[in-house]
Image: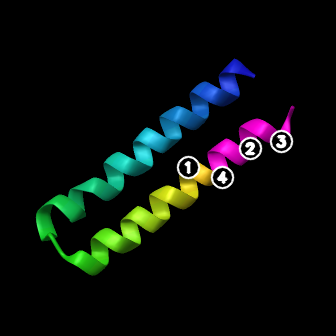
Amino acid sequence: MKFKTLAGLIGLLAIIAFLAEPVIKLHKIPLIAVVLIGVGMAIYEFSEGLHKDE
Protein backbone atom coordinates (compact mmCIF):
# COMPACT_ATOMS: atom_id res chain seq x y z
CA MET A 1 0.00 0.00 0.00
CA LYS A 2 2.74 2.47 0.86
CA PHE A 3 4.63 1.59 -2.32
CA LYS A 4 1.53 2.30 -4.39
CA THR A 5 1.10 5.68 -2.72
CA LEU A 6 4.75 6.62 -3.11
CA ALA A 7 4.87 5.50 -6.74
CA GLY A 8 1.71 7.45 -7.50
CA LEU A 9 3.07 10.62 -5.92
CA ILE A 10 6.33 10.28 -7.85
CA GLY A 11 4.30 9.84 -11.03
CA LEU A 12 2.21 12.92 -10.29
CA LEU A 13 5.32 14.99 -9.64
CA ALA A 14 6.87 13.71 -12.85
CA ILE A 15 3.86 14.60 -15.00
CA ILE A 16 3.58 18.05 -13.40
CA ALA A 17 7.29 18.71 -14.00
CA PHE A 18 7.01 17.46 -17.59
CA LEU A 19 3.99 19.62 -18.40
CA ALA A 20 5.14 22.72 -16.51
CA GLU A 21 8.03 23.54 -18.84
CA PRO A 22 5.95 24.36 -21.96
CA VAL A 23 3.46 26.31 -19.85
CA ILE A 24 6.21 28.42 -18.30
CA LYS A 25 7.91 29.10 -21.63
CA LEU A 26 4.86 29.75 -23.83
CA HIS A 27 2.33 31.49 -21.51
CA LYS A 28 -0.65 30.59 -23.71
CA ILE A 29 -4.03 30.52 -21.95
CA PRO A 30 -5.46 27.55 -23.93
CA LEU A 31 -2.31 25.52 -23.22
CA ILE A 32 -2.54 26.34 -19.51
CA ALA A 33 -6.19 25.22 -19.49
CA VAL A 34 -5.39 21.92 -21.19
CA VAL A 35 -2.48 21.23 -18.84
CA LEU A 36 -4.59 22.02 -15.77
CA ILE A 37 -7.33 19.68 -16.99
CA GLY A 38 -4.77 16.94 -17.60
CA VAL A 39 -3.16 17.36 -14.19
CA GLY A 40 -6.58 17.42 -12.56
CA MET A 41 -7.50 14.16 -14.28
CA ALA A 42 -4.22 12.59 -13.16
CA ILE A 43 -4.84 13.65 -9.55
CA TYR A 44 -8.40 12.33 -9.70
CA GLU A 45 -7.22 8.98 -11.09
CA PHE A 46 -4.56 8.75 -8.38
CA SER A 47 -7.07 9.40 -5.61
CA GLU A 48 -9.57 6.93 -7.08
CA GLY A 49 -6.85 4.29 -7.31
CA LEU A 50 -5.95 4.77 -3.66
CA HIS A 51 -9.55 4.56 -2.47
CA LYS A 52 -10.40 1.56 -4.64
CA ASP A 53 -8.47 -0.81 -2.36
CA GLU A 54 -10.36 0.20 0.78
Q: Are marks 1 and 4 in contact (CB under 8 Å)?
A: yes
Please name the amino acid that badge 4 sits on. Answer: Glu
The image quadrant that residue 26 belongs to is bottom left
Is 49 situated above or below 30? above
Please give the count of numbered marks on the rendered protein. Answer: 4
Q: Residue furthest top?
A: 2
Magenta span: chief secondary structure: helix
What residue is disc 4 on? 45
Q: Residue furthest right?
A: 54
Q: Are marks 3 and 2 in contact (CB under 8 Å)?
A: yes
Q: Are marks 4 and 3 in contact (CB under 8 Å)?
A: no
Q: Residue at x 48, y 64 (%)?
A: 38
Residue 30 place in picture, x, y as percent: 29, 80
Please name the amino acid that badge 3 sits on. Answer: Lys
What residue is disc 1 on? 43
Residue 52 is marked as 3
The secondary element bearing badge 2 is classed as: helix
Q: Are marks 2 and 4 in contact (CB under 8 Å)?
A: yes
Q: Is residue 16 left or right of residue 25?
A: right
- Which tag, 1 or 2, sits closer to the chain's start? 1
Please name the amino acid that badge 1 sits on. Answer: Ile
Q: Are marks 3 and 1 in contact (CB under 8 Å)?
A: no
